[in-house]
Image (tube, rainbow, N blue to C red):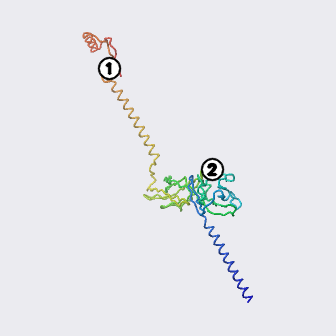
Amino acid sequence: MPVFRTMKMFSMMIVLQIFVHVWMVQLAESRASGVVEVIATLGQPVLLSCNWGKALEPNNIRVYWQGPGAGRGEKNVMVVHAYNKGKEEFTEQDSRYRNRTSMNRDLISQGNLSLLIKDIKAIDDNTQLIAHVQEGSANTQDICNRMLRVTAEFQKPEVNVSCVEGREELKIDCKSHGGFPKPKLSWTGLNQRGNNPSPIVTSNSIDGTYTIHSTLWVNISKDQRVTCHVTNPTSQKNINASIITYASCQVPPDHYLIEICSAVTVAVTLIIVAIFLYKRKSLVCSHPDLCCRKAQAPTTSNQEEEKINMNEYAGGDSGAEPWKCR
C-alpha cells in the first residue's frame, strides 16, 4: 500500500509538472502574439491605445512607456514617455521623442493609458513599445505591447520611353519617390529582356523617404502596353503607370519639346505682326493726305487764302508752314 501511494503521488507530480509546463508555453505564446501592430503615417501623429480596464488613481500610479535602446539589448532600454503620480516627467526621456509625446491625464482615472506620439519619423519604424505600470507599491506590470510600423505612400511612377540608335529595343524608365519604407518594383508587359531587373533605391537623408528607379529593355513592338508597379510593403498599396510602345524608334515628342515649339511659334508670330504693322505705317505715311496735316496758319482774308492756294498749286513758295506728319 505505501508503495502504491508513493507511485500515485509521483504520477500526480508528473502530471502537475506537465500542466505547469504547458501553461507556461501557452502564456509565452499569448505574450508573443499580444504584440499589436500600429500603422503610423510619416509626419503625422499616432495614438498607441492602452486601456487597463479598471479605474485608477492618477496620483498613485506610475506609467513608463519604454522601448529598446540603440543597442537593442534587454538591459539597454529607452524611455519614450514617463508619468509619475500626477505629472509627466521628461528628465529620462530619450532625445528622439523630446516634445513629441503626451498622455491625457483626464483619462488616466478611467484606466486609459494611451500614448500620443506626434510627427512620426522614419526612425520610429519597427519600434516596439511597452507600457510598464505600477499602482501604488504593487509590483510593476507590463501591458499594452505595441509595434510601430511607419509608412508613407509613393508618388505615381513616371514612365518614359526612349530609343538608342543602332538597337532594336526600346528603353523604358520608371521612377517614383517620396515613400517609406523601401518599396518593391516590378514590371508587367512583353518581350522584356530578363525578369524584373534590380531597381536602384536611394534614401533621402533629411526625412528618410525613398526614391526608386528601374530601367527595362523591350523589343520594339507596336501598340503593346508595359506597366511599372511600385508596392509599399507596409501598407501593401500598389501604384502603377503604363506606356504604349510603338513599331519604330520614331519617338513622339515629349511635353517639354512641345512646350518649346509652342513658345517659338508664338514668338515668330509676334515678330511677323510687328514687322507688318511697321511696314503698314511706313506705307501710309508716304501719302501726306492720309497721315500728314498742314500746320495751322493765322486767319487771313479770302483774297490771301486764294493767293496761297494758287501758289501751292503752282508749286511756288507762299511762305506757309510745311507739311507735318503725325
What residue is drawn where x is 32% and y is 20%?
A: 293
Q: Would you name the residue on which mark 2 appears?
A: 99
Q: Give the farthest residue toward the right.
A: 2
Q: Position of residue 208 (x, y in %)?
A: 60, 53
Residue 166 shows up from this direction: no
Identify the secondary structure beneath mark 1: strand
Identify the secondary structure beneath mark 2: loop
Q: Quadrant of the C terminus?
A: top left
Q: Position of residue 265 (x, y in %)?
A: 41, 40
Is 219 placed left or right of 120 in the picture?
Answer: left
Q: Nearer the viewer, residue 108 or 258?
A: 108
Q: Nearer the viewer, residue 71 or 273?
A: 71
Q: Position of residue 300 (x, y in %)?
A: 28, 10
In primary-sequence order, the first of circles 1 and 2 is 2
Q: Position of residue 182 (x, y in %)?
A: 58, 57
Q: Would you name the residue on which mark 1 appears?
A: 293
Q: Nearer the viewer, residue 260 or 143?
A: 143
Mark 1 vs mark 2, CA separation in Å: 82 Å
Q: How many marks?
A: 2
Residue 38 shows up from this direction: yes
Mark 1 or 2: the one toward you:
2
Q: Amino acid at mark 2?
A: Asn
Q: Nearer the viewer, residue 197 or 45?
A: 45
Quadrant in the rendering for residue 1? bottom right
Is 288 placed left or right of 229 in the picture?
Answer: left
What residue is drawn where x is 61% and y is 66%?
A: 34
Is 140 placed left or right of 261 in the picture?
Answer: right
Q: Give the farthest residue toward the bottom.
A: 1
